[in-house]
Amino acid sequence: MNSSEIIDSGSLTGDNSYFIFSELVEYQKEGNVLFLRLTEGSIALEFLTSDILRVVMAKGDNQVDFSSTPAVVDHTLNYNNFSILDRTELLEVKTESLKILINKKNFSLSFYDLEDKLIHQDYNDHALGWSGDQVRAWKKLEEQERFYGLGEKTGYLDKRGRKYTMWNTDTFNPHVPSTDPLYQSIPFLIGFNQGRSYGIYFDNSYQTYFDLGLNSKEYYSFWSEGGKLDYYFINGSNIKEIIKSYTDLTGRMPLPPKWSLGYHQSRYSYHPEAEVREIAQKFREKEIPCDVIHLDIHYMDEYKVFTWDEKEFPQPKQMLSDLSKDGFKVVTIIDPGVKKDPSYKLYQEGIKHDYFCKYLDGEYYIAKVWPGECAFPDFTKAEVRRWWGDQHHLLLDQGVKGIWNDMNEPGIFSKTSTMDLEVVHDNDGDMGTHRRFHNLYGLLEGQATYEGLKRYNFEERPFVLTRAGFSGIQRYSAVWTGDNRSFWIHLELAIPMLMNMGLSGITFCGTDVGGFADNSDGELLTRWIQLGLFMPFLRNHCAINNINQEPWSFGEEYEEIIRKYIKLRYRFLTHLYNLFYQAHQSGLPVMRPLVLEYPEDEKTYNLSDQFMVGDSVLVAPVYQPDRSERMVYLPKGEWQDFWTGQSYQGQKHIIAKAPLDTIPIFIKAGAILPLSPVMNYVGEEKIEELELNIYLSGDVKEGSYRLYEDDGSSFAYQQGGYNIREFSYLYYTDRLEVNIDSLADDYQLEYSSYLIKFRNLDLEPSIVVVDGVESDQWEYNNGDLELKVVIEASKIEIK
């Protein structure tokens, strides 16, 4: 075979010789695919849109394999309106938004916009290659390039300068900035260079790696221990477009049940039944809002999944019914390990129908986890996923409302901490070893669980929480970041980790508030709850044998502050739910790094300790002990302190006051922010009046907010059962105008009026106009610089 070679010291096993794709022999266009035959093998360029190009490599005489991992959703993306210009040394391929240059002598790809500005390019003449089972791509590393994404990774927001491994791992050791890998594998990377963005999704489920400039200042690379080189190049004018295109490929989250956005309380473990009831009673007595209680493994009989310990929980159905009457939903943990017990019905069924993972010789794979020796469902088989999903009726029949998937890396009590790599998975006839399916195990269990819950009760949206996953997990499950610890550094690490997970398509994410392992204290829990106020998934969870960390655990001083912030979570719930709708529609995260909203501002490029909630709320958590103030960077524009109303001009740092009872929150001037009434749980009372706060500014004369609303529980929204109302205003020196346009009106709103609050209004206006009609139903408070006007919801017309 004719080939070039490259010696790369950053390879997986040290110095390795790679066969490098070099000279183009011939090319052919077939529909939306450009086939390239080179001396070392074949490459297919599949055009999905004018901005999304799939690159698939085949070694030697092998045919190009267009199959995908389960991460990629079924889609109709197909773009064949591209032209090819054959030049002496280059092929020039043009779409409606890209120009791609293909080096014919030494194969490489270079991507330009139509103004001939370079977006991204392969590394010199070393673009693609392989060594044994490894497949690898090399990319030019630009001097000022930043990297975001890669899902659940420690460290700062910008991922440049380190090497990252994609291999789902149960990591109980303390998570520090160098800890890698963790529980999730999301091989999606966003490149960002001086405002120009692109994405790369490496669709390979084997153990994969991204070296983002650790071993070279000239290139970065990604590679895998097996499978094929198959990646998607995604062009976009900004990071938001990149995320939208990536989630076009891997799917977006369905709308969750609204109650799941409330506060969750958990512990490893609450038992017996009396303790669960006591915890619930305390929340209501102390008027601390809570929607969900989680039950860890001690609710089960000998840790056997889909069972109850009859001694500790003698009447689970009655207990769950009583809790439900008081507004509590219960989420139960499920691990994939099925206890090896001939008298256990689930084990019997799995053996009888050949549902468990095994070796090639037919011997079942048996390993120890919490129940002792266990067998493990082969979720790569559709029949097994359906069987597993159907088992959940055993819990749902009792009144369980959600499922928490744990230990699904899969985690095993062994030296390797996971399943033997020699185990084979059936994959509906396309058999492969665990090397190929390890990273997919949690994703496929999540699919089985979600679809099983949905089949059981198609009128209710499922809630599933998972520890392990792969790209596409957002279609089925919320994600928490696993076994963190009660250390301040873990509070700090959570902020960029959650932001990058959001950039990677996983919107519904959070950490164990207060820390899972070790012992929290009042100050740490309070500061973590303040961050949790804006985490998409908010759960307080800690380990067995550690001190309690319920909201009241550290005395009245901390309890009062924690109560304040959990109540504030419920005040923000309408806004948060609206952002979840945006995530469902476009893939955009709820919790956003500032670079997503301000890509022209270099100070945001690695800003790791503050974030945006949507595009108008800026949050700067306190993540160190004994702090009563912190530095906050405000981007361009005017910003108003949520607590005091004080205004600040942006593009500068300020010192924000942050005593223990305060987390710095700033609202972008001109923004509209809905705030809901405080309740003990979602749906406790009918909302009679929705409050909308308009943060006026002398510099911003108009603004708008599009509010999505539905029943928060069913799938009626998929058939149009929702409302969208757009609130807008104009602000003049002596005149205020507010308009409400109903853009969709197929859901009966529960409230009868809107309370509009114009904040930061220095002078009382002469005229207030509502939907084009002058109103006298308003009042101005000179002391608060606030004007209130009430608008009846029934009088809003569809426009």
Image (tube, rainbow, N blue to C red):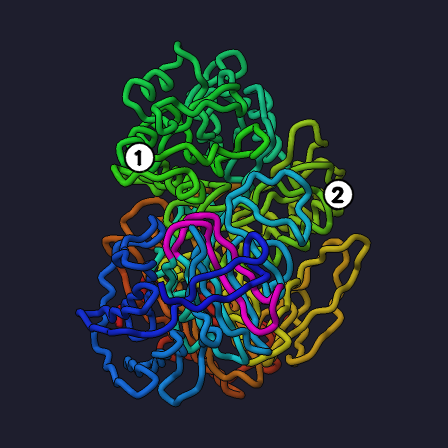
Q: Main secondary structure of the magenta part?
A: loop
Q: Position of residue 712 (x, y in %)?
A: 37, 48
At x 40% / y 43%, what residue is drawn? Answer: 436
Amino acid type, mark 1: Asp
Residue 13 covered by magenta stretch: no
Q: Amino acid at mark 2?
A: Gly
Give the residue displayed 59% in from the left and 63% down from the top.
159
Q: Which residues are magenta?
A: 203-228
Residue toward you, 561 or 793? 561
Residue extending farthest front: 1
Tell me which residue sits at (55%, 63%) in the image: 8
Return the residue at label 1: 426
Asked if residue 735 shows in the view, the reply is: yes
Does residue 602 sit above or below 115 in this rendering?
above
Image quadrant assignment for residue 229: bottom left
The N terminus appears in which quarter of the rendering? bottom left
Q: Secondary structure at mark 2?
A: helix
Q: Is residue 256 above or below residue 756?
A: above
Residue 692 visible from this viewpoint: no
In the rendered image, the quadrant that contains the C terminus is bottom left
Disc 2: CA contacts within 10 A as few (<14), some (14-19) or many (>=20): many
For disc 2, the marked residue is 522
Where residue 298 appears, x then y in whole percent?
A: 55, 22
Which quarter of the picture shows residue 773?
bottom left
Inspect the magenta stretch and tell me whether residue 210 lies in it: yes
How far across and how far down the image is residue 20, in percent?
42, 66
